[in-house]
Amino acid sequence: MTIVMYEGNKRLRVDEGGRREPQAGEVRIRVAYAGICGTDLHIYHGHMDARVELPHIMGHEMSGIVSAVGEGVTGCAPGDRVTVRPLDACGECPACLDGYAHVCHRLRFLGIETEGAFQSEWIVPAQTLHRLPDALSLKHAAMIEPLAVACHDVRLGEVQPGEYVVVLGGGPIGMLIALVARQAGARVLVSEINPFRLRMASELGLDVVNPQEQDAEALVLRETGGRGADAVFEVTSSAAGAELMTRLPRTRGRIVVVGIFNHKPQIDLHRFFWRELKLCGARVYEREDFEAAIRLAAEGALPLERLITHTYPLAQAELGFKQMESGGDAMKVMLACGGEQ
């Protein structure tokens, strides 16, 4: 069994580990594919050492096949094709009791507070599983978790057919938000500075703007007849994005903050007053968003294959992280963990 261990300070160790049997309420999955996401990169850079226990197994975007089930587990069996919604809520805090377990006050995120999917086999709580349709490839299914993020964001943004939507940031999450919003019937503009991402968005039929080369606000006003965007999604986690997001919406337009800001940005609250703007935070996803993501992927409604730009064997995970660091011509970097059938 191959395991990729993060040991701190950008050090990864590939090791061979022993297999353990799932306990009551647990399921063991033979991992097929696992995606490297921005959170994994933050862990790799040491920015989350206070949150993870070293050595640590990262990874939470995945697909695989159930290989064993623990006592008391029903609804799944060895051979089932699955993905994991990597949230372990306490069930007792105010958020959980109000029906918002995805933002549990004591939430444990699998792959951060627990060991993750960068290994040949992964043991998880059975209630985190989602069954996959047979028609959906396991490689594409490893995109379900980030796609569920996008479905959650677009749902909270209340995007309607015919609306004009701006997505600030064209990385994997931003691109998926743009594609899901377009699937919902919106016209979408992606604001991005990376040439590769701009070119990909354009090739996928999305409108694009590089805010370093063109006045994004003037473009939005021109495209909407001076009205402004119906909804803006901030996915850059940058001061520039926080400043731009308030200048783009129409009167009573909507702003959804998706990016994670490690430093408190300056926000133009006068603009909120002046145009009666609505601000919404969006964190991870709920069960319905995972199910929506699975439906979209299974229907082939989104160009997931185009978004997967690099795939490395699990034992070469460090090459995947180096590719992520380099930026450039990369979108979603995937690890093949050896469990595909």
Image (cartoon, helix red, strand yellow):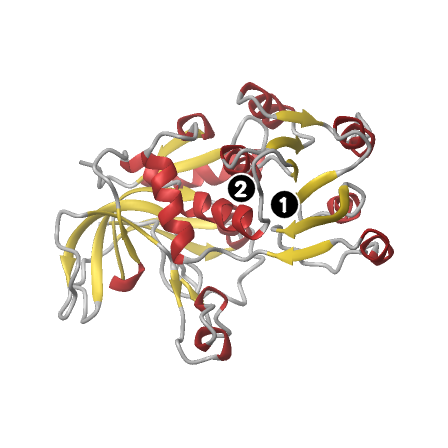
Report the front residue among 314 and 8. Answer: 314
- Residue 224 lies left or right of residue 146; in this view the side is right
Classify 10 Å Cα crowding around label 2: few (below 14), some (14-19), many (20 and above). many
Considering the numbered disc 1 on the image, is that residue within a helix, a strand or a loop?
A: loop
Q: Is residue 91 above or below residue 154?
A: below
Q: Can residue 59 be seen?
A: no
Classify 10 Å Cα crowding around label 1: few (below 14), some (14-19), many (20 and above). many
The image shows residue 322 at horizontal and vertical percentages of 51, 37
Q: Amino acid at mark 1?
A: Val
Report the front residue among 69 and 250. Answer: 250
- Residue 116 lies left or right of residue 163; in this view the side is left
Spatial separation of the CA atoms under disc 1 and disc 2 = 8 Å
- In the rendered image, the quadrant that contains the C terminus is top left
The image shows residue 64 at horizontal and vertical percentages of 25, 45
Q: Residue at x 84, y 58 (%)?
A: 273
Marking on residue 191: none
- Residue 13 lies left or right of residue 182; in this view the side is left
Q: Residue at x 40, y 59 (%)?
A: 56
Q: Amino acid at mark 2?
A: Ile
Instruction: Count all numbered tags in the image, as a single digit.
Output: 2
Q: Can residue 225 be seen?
A: yes
Which residue corresponds to mark 1?
235
Q: Residue at x 37, y 33 (%)?
A: 312
View extreme (top): residue: 203
**Quadrant of the rendered image containing residue 281:** bottom right
Which residue corresponds to mark 2?
173
Q: Residue at x 27, y 33 (%)?
A: 137
Considering the numbered disc 2 on the image, is that residue within a helix, a strand or a loop?
A: helix
Circles 1 and 2, Cβ within 8 Å, touching? The answer is yes
The image shows residue 115 at horizontal and vertical percentages of 36, 60
